[in-house]
Image (cartoon, helix red, strand yellow):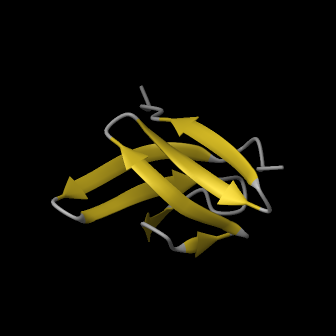
Amino acid sequence: MLDPSVALRGVFMNGERAKAFLTSSDNPAGVWIAMNDQWSGWRLSEVKPNEVVLEANGERQTLPLTVLK
């Protein structure tokens, strides 16, 4: 199961290149991960303008874009 503190804070899309900016309690500063990269045991499998999909061990988790106020 994906850590509930994981949040999608940004998306980058340019042609075939796509990345997601994720934060978590373990990494509050955040990290950019590219399509098919592994992060905390999860693979970034889809990037859309407002959400991403992470996969691990046959499980899929969709994270909506969360904007800080």
Residue at horizontal 45 percent and vertical 35 percent from the top: 65
Image quadrant assignment for residue 61: top right
Is residue 29 depicted above or below 53 in this figure? below
Lateral position of residue 60 relative to residue 23, left or right: right
Residue 1, image x, y percentages: 84, 49
Quarter of the image with the C terminus in it: top left
Lateral position of residue 30 relative to residue 6, left or right: left
Lateral position of residue 51 relative to residue 19, left or right: right
Residue reaching furthest to the front? 58
Residue reaching furthest to the top? 69
Residue 16, image x, y percentages: 22, 64
Residue at horizontal 65 percent and vertical 53 percent from the top: 24
Is residue 51 depicted above or below 27 in this figure? above
Residue at horizontal 42 percent and vertical 56 percent from the top: 20
Residue 45, image x, y percentages: 51, 58
Residue reaching furthest to the left? 15
Is residue 38 depicted above or below 47 in this figure? below
In the foreground, 52 or 3: 52
Residue reaching furthest to the bottom? 37
Residue at horizontal 40 percent and vertical 50 percent from the top: 47
Q: Give the mark count.
A: 0
Is residue 69 depicted above or below 31 in this figure? above
In the foreground, 32 or 41: 41
